[in-house]
Image (cartoon, coloured by chain):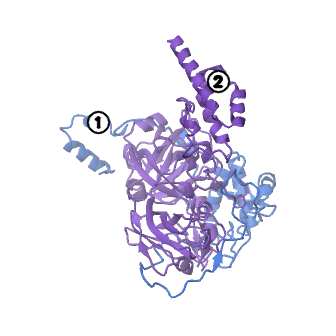
Chain colours: A purple, B blue
Amino acid sequence: MLGKLRRLNQAVSEIALKESERLPSNERRRFLRSGLFTAGGAMVGGALGGLSPRLGAAQTQYPPEIPSWTRSLGAGVVSDPYGVPSPFEKDVIRRNVPWLTADKVSSISFSPLQHLKGIITPNGLFFERHHAGRPEIDPQQHRLMIHGLVERPIVLSMEDLQRFPSVSQINFIECPANGGMEWRGAQLNSLQFLHGMVSCAEWTGVRLSTLLQEVGMKPEGKWLLAEGADGAAMTRSIPMEKALDDVIVAFAQNGEALRREQGYPIRLVVPGWEGNTHVKWLRRLEVGDKPWMQREETSKYTDLMPDGTAHGFTWVMEAKSVITSPCPEMPVRGKGVCQIEGLAWSGRGKVKAVDVSVDGGRNWQQAQLREPVMSKSLTRFSLEWNWDGSPALLQSRVIDETGYVQPTLGQLKAVRGTNSIYHKNAIQTWQISGDGSVTNVQL
Amino acid sequence: MFSFDKSSRSISGLCSGLMFAVLPAFALAESAGHYGYGSPATEEQIQAWDIDIRPDGQGLPEGSGSVEEGMGIYETYCSSCHGAFGEGMGRYPKLSGGEGSLTEDRPEKTIGSYWPYASTLWDYIHRAMPFFAPQSLTDDQVYALTAYVLNLNYIVDGDFVANKDTLPQVKMPNEDGFIWEDPRPEVTNVRCMEDCKDEVTVSDSAADKNLTPSTTGPLDEGLTE
């Protein structure tokens, strides 16, 4: 067996050496100098494969050339025991706006919506919002306590929690401050930074109703306090009606354990409600008869109106949509047929329709919704557009299943003024210039 | 379907009398739930973790602290971020001032001008401050800091001593400034499809504002406002 393998390696080495003669001379020298082929044929594939990213612009790999990766062996299985994206995708990362927050510990990062396809956000690209940094929690040492107005207060280990029947559901999570830098004018010229505080995943966990039934809720229990185990001990009060409706204690995200940034080992998922209610690193659920009026529901995450009053408990994320291609990062690639694509969502249910305008909202056409269209999930839409090369103003407008129509920025500002920070779900306008470049503008 | 009061539980238990698998769970109804996973939370465990404070004072512990005691603690743990008089530093929050500014073009939402409940101050200082060492202060220190910050905002006098009886009596200036019912949808757009407006004017553009970090290459660290 070993001899056979050696002979195979020898044969592969010889082929590789021969193949290297077809490489440009400088690449061939580098290949030979690497000496890897002498160390055994098994390495050759990797060595040759490794050449490809280094090929100069002058050396093409497309027809009529036969690419180097076709004439060599690739990396073996478990070369990346936990897979990572291609090095060519290195620009596709979460990013932050350094001037936005005092530090990175209590801050936010934005999902690269301009690069994402479909409706599921890959776990490594899900936007982050931490109030006191991302804790490193040992799941063996983590506990969920459920107490308050219940018959049987309990403490659950993560193993205990996973013994309960679980459900999976696809839901978006959006920070209510998404787009909040733009109330006073157009500032940021990037889809990622304008709208990237939204992401969507398949969440798996235990229904809160299952857990509350297990502990025997007392009838006077009308509110639930959820508390995180992070350094902010982040808390939100949630009315019992919502808690029993569709909230889950999630331990998995897109098929694997939650990422640390998303609350590992457990978080609340409160479908359709503002992101901060989805308490991460969940350690405690308390049933009570009144809300607790915590810092993150009084001082923050309340909406200041022009008359000086503030609206609190504005939990629902109202319907919103945005064209993700073209966008400032993804200009129109030339005259002719252009596939306009975007994302739409509503915290009140399903997306019913999305309309697209190319003339700043004078005229609208109904876009196509791509399946699946699910409640409180991102929905992708598209519309084919024949661009004649003249300047255009692109907009999208979502209508959700309640009949709510996404408002214009002017309509929203007429009611909310410019100081409410949160819940800016207005129609986004992209200005297309004659050269295809895209700019964030306001009408 | 879930029902939570005890009487309906026992009725459903009787109805399912033929389902033998269900019976043992109800036999244990008082001591364990249907699944019986996990451990009962002990009084000691609950007391150690139940740190939330409500506006009516529920949850406030024994202990007390004065404005004067709070001053020294504030200077040690708080002033480096929040400023000597609560005026804030850089992007760290301002704690005082801003009275009457909520209708202005640039409102200042501070504890004095915006926060509706004094209990939130005790709760938040205790659970999350100081920023670099949360849950490191004693209850007396938290009372003292609460008293001091309220005094910085002219909400209590210099001789105020905060404790579980006095703190719930403190009425915050903006308590009545909040509406705790969501009025939305408060904006109505119409789904017009053709000739929806006469003219379209661009009022503002993000071009050339130089506020956008790079979206290619490594993370952009340099851009500042």
Looking at the picture, tell me which residue is in the foreground, A296 or A363. A363
Give neighbour class at mark 1: few <14, some 14-19, many 20+ (Cα, 10 Å): few
Residue A8 to residue A45: above or below = above
Quarter of the image with the C terminus of chain B is bottom right
For marks 1 and 2, give the CA distance: 72 Å
The residue under the point 42% across, 52% down is A170
Residue B171, given in percent of the width and then of the height, sits at 63, 69
Give neighbour class at mark 2: few <14, some 14-19, many 20+ (Cα, 10 Å): many
Pair 1/2: label in front: 2
Residue A19, given in percent of the width and then of the height, sits at 60, 30
Find numbered disc 1 in the image and state the secondary structure of the residue it sits on.
helix
Residue A115, given in percent of the width and then of the height, sits at 55, 55
Q: How many numbered dots are placed on residues in this image?
A: 2
The residue under the point 45% across, 47% down is A203
- Residue furthest out toward the left: B18
Left or right for A217, reference A121: left
The residue that disc 2 covers is A37
Quarter of the view holding residue B205: bottom right
Find numbered disc 2 in the image and state the secondary structure of the residue it sits on.
helix
Residue type, numbered disc 2: Phe
Residue A142 to residue A192: above or below = above
Inspect this view and state whether residue A160 appears: yes
Looking at the picture, tell me which residue is in the foreground, A353 or A401. A353
Quarter of the view holding residue A242: bottom left
Residue type, numbered disc 1: Ala
Q: Chain of mark 1?
A: B
- Residue B27's tag is 1
**Contact flag, marks 1 and 2 (Cβ < 8 Å):** no
Q: Chain of mark 2?
A: A
Inspect this view and state whether residue B171 appears: no
Residue A307 to residue A210: above or below = below
The residue under the point 63% across, 47% down is A90
